Image (spheres, rainbow, N blue to C red):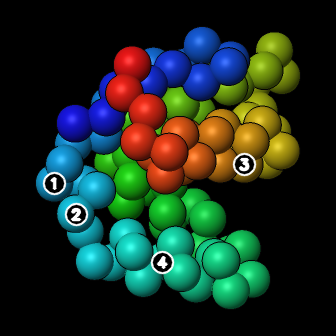
Amino acid sequence: MINGTTKSGFNYKISDDQLDDYELLETICEVDNGNNALIPKVAELGLGKKQLSELKEHLRNENGRVKTSDMFREIMEIMKGNDEGKNS
């Protein structure tokens, strides 16, 4: 289990089962190869639908929108934190 908090204050938990997912690995590899269109799939596979929805609400601005740049930053921070094996 990996627990963490992003710089913006979003708390997340990623279970060992979610991390040990071959489809997540395949999708991350595709993103690493330049297919950034798969970033939303990485987010859903890594966080799960419930946490992804919570992240969107966390980032929603006063106009009711979730900025792509904010979402991308958060997802990358979460994934990089996991690569480093951070446990909070």
Q: Residue furthest front?
A: 84
Q: Which residue is mark 1?
A: 17
Of the two numbered discs 4 and 3 on the same chain, state the one appearing first in sequence: 4
Residue 11 placement, left or right of 55 = left
Rendering coords of residue 81 (x, y %): 53, 40
Sort mark 3 into few (<14), some (14-19) or many (20+) by Cα contacts within 10 Å: some
Instruction: Give the Cα separation between the discs numbered 4 and 3.
Output: 15 Å
Mark 1 or 4 closer to N-term? 1
Which residue position holds label 4?
Answer: 27
Please tell me whether mark 1 sits on a helix, a strand or a loop: helix
Image quarter of the C terminus: top left
Q: Nearest the camera: 50 or 83?
A: 83
Q: Residue at x 74, y 42 (%)?
A: 73
The residue that mark 3 highlights is: 72
Q: Amino acid at mark 4?
A: Thr
Task: Kindly report which numbered mark, 3 or 1, lies closer to the viewer in this rendering.
Answer: 1
Viewer-side label of 2, 4:
2
Q: Are marks 2 and 4 in contact (CB under 8 Å)?
A: no
Residue 59 location, x and y as percent? 68, 25
Does residue 73 appear anywhere in the picture?
Answer: yes
Is residue 85 shown left or right of residue 77?
Answer: left
Q: Residue 12, relative to residue 7: is it above or below?
A: below
**Mark positioned earlier in the residue sequence (3 or 1):** 1
Residue type for callout 1: Asp
Residue at x-position 44% and y-position 24%:
4
- Checking the image for residue 20, the label placed there is 2
